Amino acid sequence: MSRRILSWLCCALALLALSGCGRGAEAEGAEGVSVVTTGFAAYDFARQLLGERGEAELLIPPGSETHSFEPTPKDIIDIQNCDLFIYTGGESEAWVADVLESVGGGVRAVTLMDCVELLEEETVEGMEDPHAGHDHGHGAEYDEHVWTSPRNAALICGKIAAALSEADPQGAESYAAALEDYCAQLDELDAAFTEVVESGARRTVVFADRFPLLYFARAYGLEYFAAYPGCSDDAEPSAATVAFLIDKVREEDIPVVFHIELSNELMADTVCDETGAEKRLFSACHNVTRAQFESGVTYMELMWDNVDALREALS
């Protein structure tokens, strides 16, 4: 645990002791079910399923980098007092285990990485290897971006709906109905992606950026080239990586080069300037801008934008 998180944990626990409030006391006086989430996709899934029966809170500020997030004392108190805590899991959220242990257990939680069959993070041809030259001393690292496949999203929503029903038994029928409706929307989205891929002139996409879309690519049989795996730290790409992507776009006459949300887009700009390809956003839905958040943008809206972007890229 980092010293900063340890310090904040001590502060949060002191505040809890002084206020005398714990999860049970807070829940008893609250109106509706309270859900706290670490990522945008889980936040939106929760609010779609909650409807009018409660509220969801997004811990990670809109517009910020999710992989370097550290909780504040208020965040820790919110986790302690909520009716359901939803987090991704994995190395980028290693802090969660420390927080849950520090508050003494008893927090009802859903871990997204426990909802689906996990895929090992991979390094494809031309990609910077973030682990080169480092011995991490552990086994396989799994890709954490499990929500990027609509099929996985349906599985995740099923687990969230079940947890909400446990927290709020009187709302079980409401959650079941909301789940059925939302899964129907996910099925429609899945069918659209399938149609785009099957009718496309190619099955290869290029990301001049990180690639947090392994589950998406596997779901629809896409091949990809990218600068980094999904959870790699931001860094300047090597000249060899940029040159490889430029050559690949030229060789395969790729019409679109993607970047992900909240990227500085510099690498995508370079590849597009050199090749004449069009730069497009493909949202991994890991976070959104402040303006998008305040406007109420949804996972479904972002993914339908991805349908249009993918259609252009595979043309």
Image: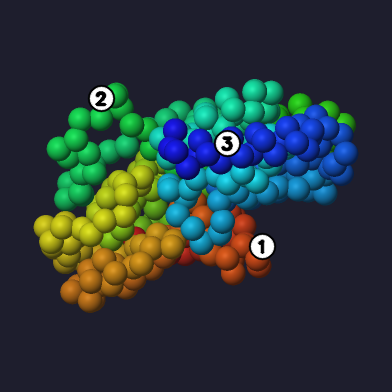
Seen in the picture, residue 95 relative to 250 is either above or below; the reply is above
Depth check: 24 or 102 in front?
Answer: 102
Q: Earlier in the sequence, mark 3 or mark 1?
A: 3
Image point 57% across, 25% down: which residue? 101
Name the kind of residue labelled 1 in the image.
Gly
In the picture, measured across the screen, residue 311 lies left or right of residue 72, that is left
Give the labeled residue for mark 3: 9
Residue 63 in the image, given as x and y percentages of width and height: 51, 61
Q: Earlier in the sequence, mark 2 or mark 1?
A: 2
Residue 180 in the image, given as x and y percentages of width and height: 71, 40
Residue 236 in the image, given as x and y percentages of width and height: 23, 59
Name the element at disc 3.
Answer: helix
Name the kind of residue labelled 3 in the image.
Leu
In the picture, measured across the screen, residue 78 lies left or right of residue 90, that is right
Give the labeled residue for mark 2: 137
In the picture, measured across the screen, residue 315 lies left or right of residue 46, that is left
Seen in the picture, residue 30 relative to 119 is either above or below; the reply is below
Depth check: 175 or 73 in front?
Answer: 73
Q: Looking at the image, is mark 3 or mark 1 nearer the viewer?
A: 3
The span from disc 3 to disc 1 (Cα, nearest Å) is 31 Å
> Toward which corner of the image does residue 309 lie, by quadrant?
bottom left
Seen in the picture, residue 174 relative to 252 is either above or below; the reply is above
- Looking at the rendered image, the quarter that the N terminus falls into is top left
Name the element at disc 1.
Answer: loop
Give the labeled residue for mark 1: 296
The span from disc 3 to disc 2 (Cα, nearest Å) is 28 Å
Image point 76% across, 48% down: which residue? 55
Q: Looking at the image, is mark 3 or mark 2 nearer the viewer?
A: 3
